[in-house]
Amino acid sequence: MTGDNKLMLSVVPDPSTRARERAAQNWARYPDATDGVSLPPVVHETVELLRARTVFDLGRQFTDKQRVAIARFVITMSVAVGGHRFADGTADVVIAVSVWAGLMALLPVGVLVSRHYDAQAAAQLEAAGFTAVTDPSGRLRYVPPGRQHPGHGNPFVGGA
């Protein structure tokens, strides 16, 4: 996470002894994995946890107020541009304003749906033993069991 509130995915090597042991075991079990065919099987539960973690992190990128403000701006600009481009008379303006009002009325529903997905993802992560932590920018994040927030104890942060 950078200071300008951009969500950034960083893939860094895990320097722990356990990670090196897992890597050695995987190389021994799947020596031809580099061919792209002889890969380890996909573990559905692991993929679902990654999905839940991603959904939670993306859902927390902005506050509810920020998301509503962004949505209001996008809806207003979209309807204004569309209304200006296609309006031929009063009826078209009334339709554009009605579409705008309808979409604005749906914003609270979008917030509730977003909160629902965030809660589902959080419950799934907590059930898997993930720990809730607050990152330096104040966002709530989940880290795997026994791990630290990215950047804490990582020898690559601030270096190369």
Image: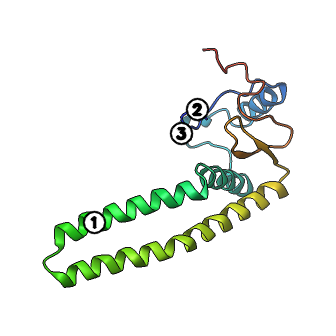
Q: Residue 133 at what x, y percent from top left?
A: 79, 43
Is the residue marked by circle 2 packed among few (<14), some (14-19), or many (20+) residues within 10 Å? few
Residue 50 versus residue 120 in the image, above or below: above
The reply to whether dot 3 and dot 2 touch (C-beta < 8 Å) is yes
From the viewer's perspective, is residue 91 above or below residue 55?
A: below
- First in residue order: circle 3 vs circle 1: 3
Q: Image height check: is 82 above or below 34?
A: below
Mark-to-mark CA distance, 3 and 1: 28 Å
Assign the N terminus to one quadrant of the image. top right
Occupied quadrant, residue 156: top right
Task: Name the residue at 86% across, 38% down.
Answer: 146
Q: To which residue does mark 2 refer?
A: 2
Q: Which mark is residue 143?
A: none
**Kind of residue at disc 3:** Lys
Q: Which residue is mark 3?
A: 6
Quarter holding the C terminus is top right
Instruction: Describe the colour scheme in one phrase.
Output: rainbow
Q: Amino acid at mark 2?
A: Thr
Q: Which residue is mark 1?
A: 80
**Identity of the amino acid at label 1?**
Ala
> Mark 3 against mark 1, which lies toward the viewer?
1
Badge 2 element: loop
Classify residue 134 by image quadrant.
top right
Q: Nearer the viewer, mark 2 or mark 1?
A: 1
**What is the tally of numbered marks visible in this picture?**
3
Per the image, label 3 sits on a secondary structure element best described as loop
Residue at 32% across, 61% down: 77
Who is closer to the viewer here, 88 or 57? 88
Tag 1 secondary structure: helix
Inter-mark Cα distance, 2 to 1: 34 Å
- Please state the horizontal and vertical placement of residue 26, each as a whole percent of the image: 73, 35
